[in-house]
Image (cartoon, grey):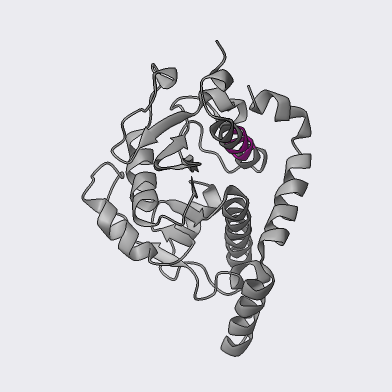
Amino acid sequence: MSLQTQVSAAEWQARCTLATLYRLIAHFRMTDLIDTHISLRVPDEPNHFLINHYGLPFERMRASDLVKINHNGDIVGAHDAGKSVNTAGFVIHSAIHAARPEIDCVIHTHTGDGMAVAAMQDGLLPLTQHALKFYQRLAYHDYEGIALDLDEQSRLVADLGTHQAMILRNHGLLTAAENPYRAFHLMYMLERACQAQVKALSTGQALTRPPEAVCARASAQFAAEDDDAYVRKVWDAAVLLIEAQLADCCR
């Protein structure tokens, strides 16, 4: 019996969307073999979310490979029996899903450029237009070791506050939004900002920073124009790049 017949239509669609998101992250080379995670709250089940079956590369992720768990990390439903979840993925994602009911999707990455900026004392610098999207809209969380301790959850949530993007110092990047389309767009922009910063710093040349007033203006412009219609257009365009994989995503 296929998994599609065992879950609600809404859950199956969420699984297809999340599998597509995993493959988009792989397409844009933001993976770390089997580590890092993306989660999506199950529609109409606020205390349950979907996350990857640990050990499967993002490039191969399918709807049926995802695991439905609760905020305690327990696998929910007999159809997901035999699958496993990475503990660090549960600790980070469950903390945000539990504390922020408006957040349905959380993306966490360990890219080379993301980790490089996470190791910089000043974090993300206002050097590019991409970076200005996050001007005064970016949280930071200090490194406490591998995220295995439930005790860290309260501090992580407190550091994120009301933001939708965060740099985990000495670790990586995180975005959290009300839907997967916005979470993806935020991560794409944050990753590009980190890539540009690492390249700019590597030149050894003096760098130009826009005046603070210009930084604030650009950030406000992003906030005003970054509506749901726009982020959905970004998503639809990105999905076209992996169009040949979509049928496999929904298996």
- Tally the numbered discs: 0
Residue 96 in percent (x, y) is at 38, 52
Q: Residue at x 35, y 28 (%)?
A: 75
Looking at the image, which is closer to me, 218 or 191?
218
Q: Quadrant of residue 29?
A: top right
Looking at the rendering, the stretch of residues picked out in magenta corresponds to: 16-23
Looking at the image, which is closer to me, 102 or 196?
102
Residue 79 in percent (x, y) is at 44, 18
Asked whether residue 17 is drawn in magenta, I would say yes
Q: Is residue 148 left or right of residue 51?
A: left
- Going by the picture, which residue comes out furthest to the left? 151
Q: Quadrant of residue 247?
A: top right
Residue 234 in percent (x, y) is at 72, 54
Quadrant where the N terminus sits is top right
Asked whether residue 249 is drawn in magenta, I would say no
Q: Residue at x 54, y 23 (%)?
A: 64
Q: Give the answer, above or below, for where 199 lies relative to 70.
A: below
Q: Residue at x 61, y 79 (%)?
A: 220
Q: Give the answer, above or below, for where 156 lies relative to 111.
A: below
Quadrant where the C terminus sits is top right
Looking at the image, which is closer to me, 109 or 62?
62
Q: Is residue 92 left or right of residue 23?
A: left
Q: Quadrant of residue 246?
A: top right
Q: Is residue 97 left or right of residue 149?
A: right
Q: Main secondary structure of the magenta part?
A: helix
Residue 111 seen in render: yes
Q: Residue at x 58, y 66 (%)?
A: 201
Residue 169 in percent (x, y) is at 39, 58
Q: Give the answer, above or below, for where 67 lies relative to 125.
A: above
Residue 142 seen in render: no
